[in-house]
Image: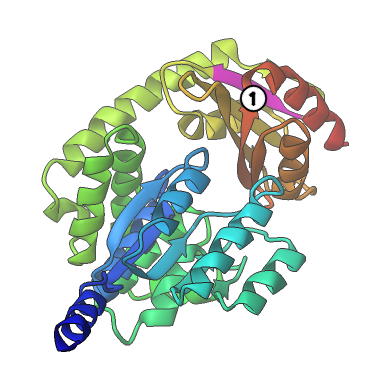
Amino acid sequence: MVSKKITKKTAIKAKPQKTKIVCLSHKEDADGISSAALIHQVFGSDTILVDYPGQMKALEQIANDEKLKTLFICDLGLSKKNQDEFVKILSELVKRRVSITYIDHHDIDSKIFKQLIKIGVKMIHDTNECTSVLTYNKFKTKLQENAAFIAVCAAITDYMEDQPISSKLLQIFDRQFALINATVLTYNIVGHQKDVDYLLYLVEELSESKYMHEIPNTFEFAQIQVGKLAKIIVKVKKEMKLMKNLGYMELSDSGASGAVNFVLGFSGKDVGVAYKERIEHGIYAVSVRGSKNCKPHLGKIVNTLATDLGGSGGGHAKACGAVIPKPKIKTFLKEFNKKLN
């Protein structure tokens, strides 16, 4: 009997302990990378970086890890297509006593927001500041002094440096110094989208509060990216097409996010659209930008339209993105143009 009791106790002790802290963050821009770096600096978290097509698959894989104790989700907005499944997965994790913090600044359905609060998710959400600034503001007493600079660079690249908290942080630093660091960071992120190991390396380096000139070869690589963008300008001028309310262009040799601002500028329209095929997924990755004069909330329009077409999307009022099934891209453009009226 004694030996059986000892065996039972030993078996109980042998059960895997919940020790893992994970940060799931957006890999396509400085806001997601910087948010992950700030979380890593405070909590020593494992970092998983994803784009929107891979968001839910990554979340499902994380949820299957029995060692998971704490989960941070940063800069990953929700769409009508995935929001219910998102709540379902997080609800199951909370039942397992996993602590979840969702930090984001994209527009979110009020019903979904309330559901997340109800199940016990810690919500740090504000559409007026970028995710990195929200992360910094929440954990600033635990962060290193240079962490404010990382948040500022993300705010600049998200065009949110004029917001209340961001503008105060920017005043700490020389503006030109911040601008060049933010630009170099962005070019390195965009140019390494297929190299996740490098993006994780950037997270690690930024978590040590390094400036971009302290990270080897970042300025040299940014220079290469500038040369590529200069070629894109020429291509946009030649190949861009116009509809009544928008300019649009398909890319084959560069990311859509790198070209969409040129499409917006050269089109003379209030909305620019750039898209690139992702053959492995059978979809188009779409980037959308609006001018200062653009009145409709582009993120809300794209969210609904993309979902209706079997894709997903959403974002800010003047900057958003979508994933559209390949056969539906022309329909997306036509319907989007109509809705801009």
* Relative horizontal placement of residue 127, taking residue 180 as reference (left or right): right
The kind of residue tagged 1 is: Pro
Q: Eyeballing the image, is 243 above or below 196?
A: above
State the residue in front, 78 or 181. Answer: 78
Q: Residue furthest front?
A: 1
Specify start and end residues of the magenta stretch as a single range. Answer: 246-250
Q: Residue at x 35, y 54 (%)?
A: 33
State the residue in front, 47 or 155. Answer: 47
Q: What x and y, as percent, mark residue 1?
A: 20, 87
What sort of colour scheme is used for the picture?
rainbow
Residue wearing tag 1: 325
The secondary structure that dominates the magenta segment is: strand
Q: Residue at x 31, y 68 (%)?
A: 21
Q: What x and y, as percent, mark residue 47?
A: 30, 57
* Relative horizontal placement of residue 157, taking residue 11 as reference (left or right): right
126 magenta-colored:
no
Q: What x and y, as percent, mark residue 280?
A: 45, 21
Judge the density around disc 1: few (<14), some (14-19), many (≥20) Cα neighbours within 10 Å: many
Q: Eyeballing the image, is 124 above or below 243?
A: below
Residue 126, quarter of picture: bottom right
Q: Eyeballing the image, is 146 above or below 161?
A: below
* Relative horizontal placement of residue 124, taking residue 324 as reference (left or right): left
Asked if one can make out residue 248 in the rendered structure from this viewpoint, the answer is yes
Q: What x and y, as percent, mark residue 237?
A: 56, 16
Q: Residue at x 14, y 83 (%)?
A: 3
Residue 115, quarter of picture: bottom right
State the residue in front, 267 or 86. Answer: 86
Asked if one can make out residue 175 in the rendered structure from this viewpoint, the answer is no
The C terminus, quarter of image: top right
